């Protein structure tokens, strides 16, 4: 925990414990001295005084132990680590990563706005009435007083974060930027209305050229996911719910588009609910014609995850994605190449591979376990992500459904595959791209092309849910 409020909470908690320990010791001492009437009244007075101090410390630690900020009072009655269920009017706090999403801490912050900026800290503020860049460094003296808040002077104005690059170039942000001193630099949090946030998520997660009903389905998914994350802090030390990378949902990597903004607006406030609770709506790129369940991640779906079932992504004309590039793919990997990758990726030296066997499959026929055997040893790998990582890496070519090719990356395209050795080559035949849990984005788009609306799309991929 790096926030100053966290240090304060820890200090008061420790101090409280010491006081309580001291109180206990004095109670014992008091019992031993009860017969010494000459000291009785003095000890009683000390005892009462310590109880009074302990109560003061308790109240202070209760008020300041909750990471002081803009909404501290409204969270006082919420269980630790849990916030009220958000609404479409709620505010989300997004930790902004550095260029390339390489880290959380910025070595500097440079901002600008055509409307000018208001920079405030501890009740004092200055106005920067120019489009010039305003720079803040980690040693800025204002951090000694508290967090620095940056807002545009114009109504609804945007703040350009000049010190960061995204896929769209220099990103611009609605709402406010909050800067917090952190070990090694500055943490930057974007605070804005959740519906405005979603206008930056949807085009970053799904091409704005996709069908409107697919974009609406994506908007409802993104909102449901965001609302789930907003019930607690992913980064309590910064009071941030999420970051802006694939760790959560990609935000502001692509410019906002009219179509995606319309999708957000026309579904405002709508979420996916399962048994009355907001569902965590996982999604991915392309299915192989089937989806899988949370078992692919080694998780027991239980009652709460019952909406994430294996379903067939097909209609009257067969699989919706049957003509898409990643619907099917193959890779012919030289034995020596795959042997080296498996040893490197798993940390187990298997030598030259003699075989790789899928020893366990889950819903949708996804691989849940593989055993890779070589002349130096063998290794067992469980869950779809670790399996994809074990067989991934550079060094081979993947041929897609349409005949185009792609170079291998750190993850195998999906865990829906078979693998066989043929001479000096391992042939991996698979389908789909991504983890396969929840909504296929390309499947949603193909469904929309065939006339499905966003509710029908969502109710195919998430079973027994309500949209509203």
Image (cartoon, rainbow, N blue to C red):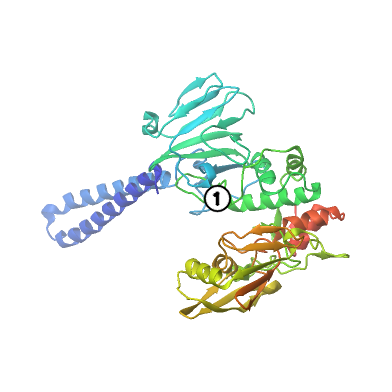
Q: Report the residue marked by disc 1.
A: 83
Task: Give residue 279's quadrant in the image.
Answer: bottom right
Residue drawn 62% across and 27% down?
Answer: 157
The residue sitting at the front extreme is 424
Q: Position of residue 204 (x, y in %)?
A: 66, 45
Q: Position of residue 382 (x, y in %)?
A: 55, 73
Residue drawn 50% across and 42% down?
Answer: 98
Q: Is residue 320 visible?
A: yes
Q: Judge whether 306 appears above or below 27 on screen.
A: below
Residue drawn 45% across and 79% down?
Answer: 376
Q: Position of residue 366 (x, y in %)?
A: 66, 72
Q: Nearer the viewer, residue 391 or 183?
A: 391
Q: Position of residue 21 (x, y in %)?
A: 26, 57
170 left or right, relative to 329: left
Describe the element under mark 1 as helix, strand or loop: loop
Q: Nearer the viewer, residue 97 or 355?
A: 355
142 left or right, relative to 165: left
Residue drawn 58% across and 30% down?
Answer: 159
Task: Give residue 333's quadrant in the image.
Answer: bottom right
- Counting every numbered tag in the picture gives 1
Q: Residues within 10 Å of mark 1 (few under 14, many from 20)?
A: some
Q: Judge whether 131 appears above or below 241 on screen.
A: above
Q: Is residue 277 visible?
A: no
Q: Judge whether 131 appears above or below 252 on screen.
A: above
Q: Nearer the viewer, residue 31 or 235?
A: 235
406 left or right, relative to 353: right
239 left or right, relative to 197: left
Q: Nearer the viewer, residue 47 or 402?
A: 402
């Amino acid at each position: 925990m790096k926030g100053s409020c966290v240090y304060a909470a820890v200090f008061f908690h420790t101090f409280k414990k010491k006081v309580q320990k001291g109180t206990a010791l004095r109670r014992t001492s008091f019992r031993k001295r009860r017969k010494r009437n000459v000291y009785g009244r003095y000890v009683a007075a000390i005892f009462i005084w310590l109880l009074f101090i302990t109560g003061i410390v308790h109240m202070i630690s209760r008020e300041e132990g909750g990471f002081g900020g803009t909404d501290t009072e409204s969270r006082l009655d919420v269980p630790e680590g849990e916030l009220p269920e958000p609404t479409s009017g709620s505010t989300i706090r997004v930790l902004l990563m550095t260029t390339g999403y390489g880290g959380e801490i910025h070595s500097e912050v440079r901002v600008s706005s055509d409307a000018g900026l208001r920079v405030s800290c501890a009740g004092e503020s200055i106005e920067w009435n120019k489009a010039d860049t305003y720079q803040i460094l980690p040693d800025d003296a204002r951090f000694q007083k508290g967090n620095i808040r940056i807002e545009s002077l114009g109504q609804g104005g945007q703040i350009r974060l000049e010190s960061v690059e995204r896929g769209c170039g220099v990103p611009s942000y609605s709402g406010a930027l909050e800067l917090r001193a952190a070990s090694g630099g500055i943490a930057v949090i974007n605070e804005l209305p959740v519906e405005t946030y979603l206008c930056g998520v949807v085009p970053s997660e799904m091409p704005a050229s996709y069908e409107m009903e697919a974009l609406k389905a994506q908007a409802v998914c993104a909102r449901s996911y965001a609302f789930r994350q907003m019930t607690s802090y992913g980064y309590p030390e910064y009071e941030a719910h999420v970051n802006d990378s694939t760790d959560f949902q990609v935000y502001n990597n692509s410019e906002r588009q009219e179509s995606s903004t319309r999708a957000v607006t026309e579904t405002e406030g709508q979420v996916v609910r399962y048994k009355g609770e907001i569902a965590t709506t996982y999604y991915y790129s392309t299915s192989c014609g089937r989806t899988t369940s949370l078992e692919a991640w080694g998780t027991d779906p239980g009652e709460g995850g019952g909406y994430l079932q294996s379903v067939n992504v097909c209609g009257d004309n067969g699989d919706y994605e049957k003509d898409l590039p990643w619907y099917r793919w193959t890779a012919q990997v030289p034995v020596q190449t795959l042997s080296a990758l498996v040893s490197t990726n798993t940390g187990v030296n298997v030598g030259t591979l003699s075989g790789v066997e899928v020893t366990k499959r889950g819903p949708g026929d996804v691989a849940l376990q593989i055993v890779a055997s070589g002349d130096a040893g063998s290794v067992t790998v469980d869950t779809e992500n670790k399996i994809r990582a074990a067989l991934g890496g550079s060094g081979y070519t993947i041929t897609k459904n349409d005949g185009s090719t792609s170079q291998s990356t750190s993850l195998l395209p999906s865990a829906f595959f078979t693998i066989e050795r043929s001479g000096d080559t391992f042939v991996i035949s698979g389908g789909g791209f991504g983890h396969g849990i929840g909504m296929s984005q390309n499947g949603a788009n193909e469904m929309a092309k065939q006339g499905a609306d966003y509710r029908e799309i969502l109710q195919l991929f998430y079973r027994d849910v309500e949209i509203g």
